[in-house]
Image: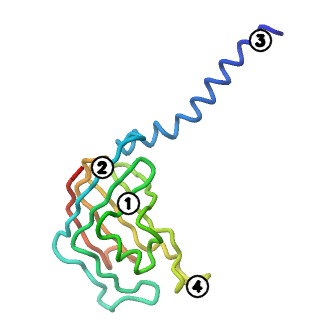
């Protein structure tokens, strides 16, 4: 019995280490960012912003996006360095720092803050999505903003790594 107890201790420790490291390694692989790294994207609007023909809706007020966004991506979260003020002012973000998800060759920001003017039972406040596409990590070259209905209200930005 004593021999079996000694063999299982290293195995349990190894399993615990692997359980802890898996999310870190997985996120690093998909985002191409290590836990101690970050990079900054400088994104400039390509063309003009499209506005809805009907002038907006109750749940989707008109938001005029800035011509330039400067966004710093860290391992777990990101931060608007320039251009995020309009999203805070229009109640889509509480602060400049945000979390993001990854999907294939895309990083996605979905504001999760529920504005005061949206009541319980109404459509959700996370109707805006910022998609960074065109590669992984520093290779991301395009940002698309889809707002409320796909193709209804959006802007496209060209991005360059400026870190």
User: Residue lying farthest top?
Assistant: 3
Estimate the x, y position of residue 5 in percent, counting from the top left: 77, 14
Which residue bears the numbered disc 4?
119
Q: Secondary structure at mark 2?
A: strand
First in sequence: mark 1 or mark 2?
A: 2
Estimate the x, y position of residue 134 in percent, counting from the top left: 26, 52
Q: Secondary structure at mark 3?
A: helix
Give the quarter of the figure containing the N terminus.
top right
Which residue bears the numbered disc 3?
4
First in sequence: mark 4 or mark 1?
A: 1
Q: Nearer the viewer, mark 2 or mark 4?
A: 2
Q: Nearer the viewer, mark 3 or mark 1?
A: 1
Q: How would you rate the neighbour count of disc 2 (Cα within 10 Å): few for under 14, some for 14-19, many for 20 or more?
A: some
**Relative vertical location of residue 104 with respect to residue 108 in this rendering, above or below:** above
**Relative vertical location of residue 22 with respect to residue 99 in this rendering, above or below:** above
Q: Is residue 72 left or right of residue 24?
A: left
Task: Tell me the distance, in whole angstroms, between the alpha carbons under discs 4 and 1.
Answer: 28 Å
Q: Secondary structure at mark 1?
A: strand
């Amino acid at each position: 019995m004593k021999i079996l107890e000694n063999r299982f201790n290293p195995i349990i420790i190894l399993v615990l280490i692997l359980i802890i490291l898996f999310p870190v390694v997985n996120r690093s692989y998909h985002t191409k960012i290590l836990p101690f790294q970050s990079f900054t994207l400088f994104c400039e609007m390509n063309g003009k912003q499209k506005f809805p023909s009907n002038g907006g809706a109750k749940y989707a007020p008109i938001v005029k996006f800035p011509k330039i966004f400067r966004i710093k991506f860290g391992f777990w979260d990101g931060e608007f360095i320039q251009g995020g003020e309009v999203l805070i002012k229009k109640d889509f973000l509480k602060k400049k720092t945000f979390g993001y998800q990854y999907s294939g060759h895309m990083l996605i920001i979905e504001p999760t803050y529920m504005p005061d003017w949206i009541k319980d039972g109404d459509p959700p406040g996370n109707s805006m999505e910022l998609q960074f596409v065109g590669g992984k990590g520093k290779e991301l070259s395009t940002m698309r903003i889809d707002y409320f209905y796909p193709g209804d209200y959006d802007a496209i930005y060209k991005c360059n790594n400026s870190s």
